Image (cartoon, grey):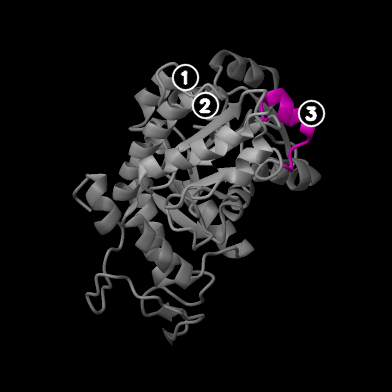
Amino acid sequence: MSNNNINTKVIHGGIAEDETTGAVSIPIYQATTFRQVELGKTKAGYEYGRSGNPTRKALESLIADLEEGAAGFAFASGLAALTTVLFLFKSGDKILTSQNVYGGTFRILDKIFKNFGVSYEIVDTANLMILEETFKKDKNIKGLIIESPANPLLTITDIKGAAEIAKKYNALTIVDNTFLTPYLQKPLTLGADIVIHSATKYLGGHSDVIAGLAVTKDPTLAERIGFFQNAAGSILEPFDSWLLIRGIKTLAVRLDRHLENAAAVAEFLKNNKAVKEIYYPGLKDFNGYEINKKQSKGAGAIISFILSDNYDYKIFFKNLKTIALAESLGGVESLACHPASMTHASIPKEIREKIGITDNLIRLSVGIEDKNDIIADLEQAINPAGKR
């Protein structure tokens, strides 16, 4: 579309209305197969639901538009999107990953692709000097997976700088943009080759659909990913595609509220004597604050923190009322998570502790409730957690 304002794009981007009827809500084409006019000739390019579906196509066009890419692809989950992208690599290749990434990303590399000869190495991607030295030492490095902000310590990587290094050594840069979404950050415009999303989170926004998305700006990569999507078959079904389109339409207004609430909660936690350490890119004294400010329009709404030693994090979780102790993030409701035993449990304890994912780390997904109610719930859960 001609209008480049993302507040308008989330509503009118991609294929925004049904070409047949003019319906402003794309219909759910709940069809597995499509009548062909004659052998080798279809009515609108669709022949079998796995290979293509009009509802899914509308979603894929929308995310490509939002991320400013050449093509988008929708999958049954974020991990399905990542797995399909990893099919781009072959035996003997090595992939670098940010130090703290989602545990599922680690699990795929460590428990699945390693079996097929694709190795990996965890590296501090926030340190570009270390990153380049790692590339120099191993000519087999063909891919770089970045999360920025990273999960769960919110570490910030200079995406443009990291992508330039990867390109110098002929490696693909893959950025997980789940935490910020294209509303706040567009990795493809910063030099990344592929962007992936757990669309289950902010893009869906209502904790009612599991989905994954991938976008690339390179037509050759798009052709390969499209082939793998069809061949492996982990596609997003029509109804879930429709739910995701509907969720994206309110992305801008939801994220504005998320950001407002997160800023207030971060200030509360920063000034609370019960909090030993806080991780949030929106705080000026956070290590990656300036880089994040340069490459994005906001810090997101995920905050991680550690309670002081004389506070029991288990009692804190038990006392939460408005905030739910639950997996996932990015929904309208506030969620609290214990990364060591939940989202990052698949990472061995020694690796978790080495990179800072300790047993007393708490991750908070700040929702869109009244910010005063969120803060009040945190306060009433923290106070009884103090050890006597």
Taking the spot 56% from the left edge, 22% from the top edge, the residue there is: 277
For residue 372, side relative to residue 313 (left or right): left
In three-dimensional space, the C-alpha distance between marks 2 and 3, rounded to whole angstroms, equals 21 Å
Provide the residue designation for mark 3.
350
Q: Which structural element holds mark 2?
A: strand
For residue 228, side relative to residue 285 (left or right): right
Residue 96, x across and y down, in percent: 64, 30
The answer to whether marks 2 and 1 mark residues whose Cβ atoms lie closer than 8 Å is yes
In three-dimensional space, the C-alpha distance between marks 2 and 1, rounded to whole angstroms, equals 7 Å
Q: Which label's residue is closer to the chain start, 3 or 1?
A: 1
Residue 264, x across and y down, in percent: 37, 32
Provide the residue designation for mark 2.
279
Residue 176, x across and y down, in percent: 52, 40
Q: How crowded is mark 2: few (under 14 residues within 10 Å), some or many (20 or more)?
A: many
Give the residues in magenta.
345-357
Instruction: Note whether residue 89 is visible.
Output: no
Q: Quadrant of the C terminus?
A: top right
Provide the residue designation for mark 1.
286
The answer to whether marks 3 and 1 mark residues whose Cβ atoms lie closer than 8 Å is no
Taking the spot 63% from the left edge, 21% from the top edge, the residue there is: 135
Q: Which label's residue is closer to the chain start, 2 or 1?
A: 2
Taking the spot 70% from the left edge, 36% from the top edge, the residue there is: 93
Amino acid type, label 1: Phe
Q: Which image quadrant is residue 76 in?
A: bottom right
Q: Is 353 contained in the magenta span?
A: yes
In three-dimensional space, the C-alpha distance between marks 3 and 1, rounded to whole angstroms, equals 25 Å
